[in-house]
Image (spheres, coloured by chain):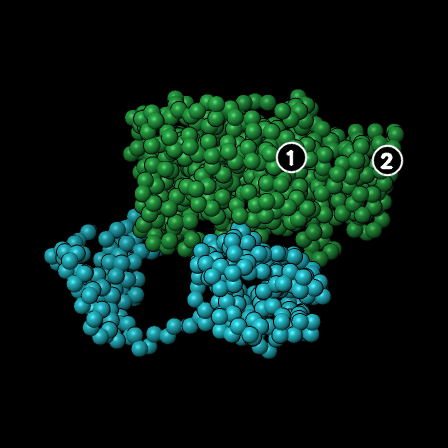
Amino acid sequence: MTTGSATTATDRREVIHLDRRLVRRARTLAIRAAAPVISLARERTTVSVERAVLRLAGLRGADPTTGDGDIPWVNRVVDAVRDQVGLEHGVALPVWHAMHEGGHASLLDLAEAVTAGTARFELPTDAAATRAHNAATRAAKAGLGQIDRNRATRDRLIRILGDPPRRPWVYLIVATGDIYEDIPQAQAAARAGADVIAVIRSTGQSLLDFVPEGATRQGYAGTYATQENFRLMRAALDEVSRELGRYVRLTNYASGLCMPEIATLAGLERLDMMLNDSMYGILFRDINPQRTFVDQRFSRMIHARAGIIINTGEDNYLTTADAVDDAHTVTVSQLLNETFAHEAGLADWQLGLGHAFEINPDLPESFRLELAHALLARHLFPEAPLKWMPPTKHMTGDIFRGYLLDGFFNLVGALTGQGILLVGMMTEAVVTPFLSDRDLALQNVRYVLDAAGGLTEDFHPPRGGFIESRANQVLAEAVGLLERITDDGLLNAIADGTFGITKRPADRGKGLDGVFVKAPGYDNPAVTLMEADLGGREPS
Amino acid sequence: MTEPIADTEPESLAVLAETAKGLDQAEQPTVIRPYGDTTGDGMVQVSFTLPMTHGPKAEGAALQLAAKMGLDPAMVVHAKGLGGRQSAYTFFVVYGRVAHLVDLDKVVVREREYPLLAAKEANLVIKRTLRRKLVVLGACIGTDAHTVGIDAILNVKGFAGEKGLEYYREMKVSNLGAQVTVPELVSRARKDRADAVLVSQVVTQRDAHLRNTRELAAAFREAMGDNRPLIVVGGPRFDPRMAEELGVDRIFGRGTTPGEVASYLVHTLTRTLTLTKETVRAR
């Protein structure tokens, strides 16, 4: 694979010294903690992974004859296979066998037969199995080919148009619920200086066990992630990228029950970044841990293939826990996210590991503590384009104070070489940002980057000083927590409420009924192809 | 364009403090106006965006709007096109004297029968009065598969910037999810010794939400009598005034946040405990 166009251009000189033994110990422990979960993920499949295989093979659209016409064909087909032969062997063999046996010209044809009740699925054997496997592999290859072409297109556009002139990239959220309203807002944001546009999803989409279809005009506090919405927004940003002479990136959310499918659609429509956290769905959405880890592995393999930068969700921990006392939980989560990401084939330049400016501003030295935490992440993951998230918890509705806080947040971002800076809004927790709020927020970012962007050169916290000591202290606490997790087992740790304050047992939560242990002979041509291209890497 | 807003001497903090004290002690006047830097000056500051290109006409438009808002005289202290040159939008900051008076006698406040508590406060009250975790059971009943309501209230992720009930350390929350039958819910409530049962209903076809709620209330009444948990129902199509008619303790409508529900539960459940030790909780 080509090296990423987004290679971090950050200054890699060390600003603080981290205890090297602690760094090594932390990584070893993270790998040890993740290993059993990776095995679990490799041994299982889910309804969404199987639906993603069909999406990759080109099955689009929804069944117009049932419900409100919003049940996607991929759901109809996978449910039918599950009912008739189970999913332990994957959908590929039964589906492409049925295509051949039923003389169906296309997957859509077969899907219509499913609705008509005439499709019969069975598990083929011998020559029939080989024939089905080969046909499924060809179909998956076509889908992966589309993803590869999109990646090449992105690389070409970046070569022609160029990357943003400086780091951090400026990341801005739009979300009106109506894709046709989002488009002009996103274009305006890009013209005003945004390098990355994120279209936030409609409330609760993560708990839908299907991906809605088509261009959508009504969402709740966000816009539905659909393939058509992805396509429309990417096209609009291509247009504005040409106008501006820099490639404007598009972000969406591969999380929730349809993580593998949304990742696939992102690859097929050339999205550039995806929110994708290893534990967010478990902790914050009560999605079953097994379901999450299986779905996450597939989605990350797709992201790796597509050259997509993932953004992890560590900022969420700090909205529920104290940003000082529990700073180390962020580090632990970053290390686990890194381990899972590497196993799925993601390179360091694709790891937008998250962290956030959430320390109570009334706390003395809060700014120095923020600097220490940000530098810890910067030094622990020197090649990763870290994602720096703005204050939300201590935004009180006093927009004037909030604007100042965002300015300090931006300053930490500039001083510590963050890769992606999510623009903070003074209206956080008040209203959806006004056009003017967004403009003011971008002025804030521009002012700080212009005024202090070069300050990294002069910024040398003293050896053994407050900042360096604090960074090492948090790292040591992270190692302590990782030791407990490794002893206990990651799934048990999650069950016991180690992360956040909620207990999430491995056999509870949403979506467990969509998880299947693979039978011998399980066939998923997409995974086989992707693993082969990664050189058949085994978990370390 | 920019003029000084008011031509007064800067007042020292001591003077301000003195004034505030004076106001405190004096009778609160029933008619007041905004306070800029002098009593009675009526000065306010507003900002807004007009969909037009910046120029003298735009500033005139902003002044016209300010006048219609009751600002007289008004000053445009800042005007700027948004998002670069040729922008079709202009942002204004306007200061001015507002002509309107506030008549305090006519201010009507909708009284909530319970105080809004922060998560920390709610936890503290539970700890002090219940001396055990407050047990909450949530579900969608009947054929309703829309868990978005109950999830918004219970999930840690929460809603509208507020964390869900799972976030409250002193609450033990179980979310049973969708399509739970009423008998299942009753038996689970009994087994878990639930203090409160939360049910969300989105589907309203042929008044299914009302029918289901009546069935829910009747089942709990029959199975547990006065020992039943607090029954709370929520959904976008409910009228909160119908609680009594439907036989439940409380109905929450559209836009309810987790904090409101938590505050209500804490208030109601701990109040009944402190009021009468003999009477079992619930009204």
Q: Quadrant of the C terminus of chain B?
A: bottom right
Label 2, label 1: how many angstroms apart (C-alpha)? 31 Å
Mark 1 lies on a secondary structure that is helix
Query: For the residue marked with disc 2, what is the amino acid?
Result: Pro
Q: Is residue A348 visible?
A: no
Chain for numbered disc 1:
A
Determine which residue is flagged by label 1.
A37
Please give the label number shown on residue A124: 2
Q: The chain shown in cyan is which?
A: B
Label 2 crowding class (10 Å Cα cut-off): few <14, some 14-19, many 20+? some
Mark 2 lies on a secondary structure that is loop
Q: Residue furthest right?
A: A126
Chain for numbered disc 2:
A
Q: Is residue B258 visible?
A: yes
Q: Which of the 4 image quarters holds residue B188?
A: bottom right
| Residue A153 screen position, x and y as percent | 56, 29
Residue under disc 2 on the same chain as residue under disc 1: yes
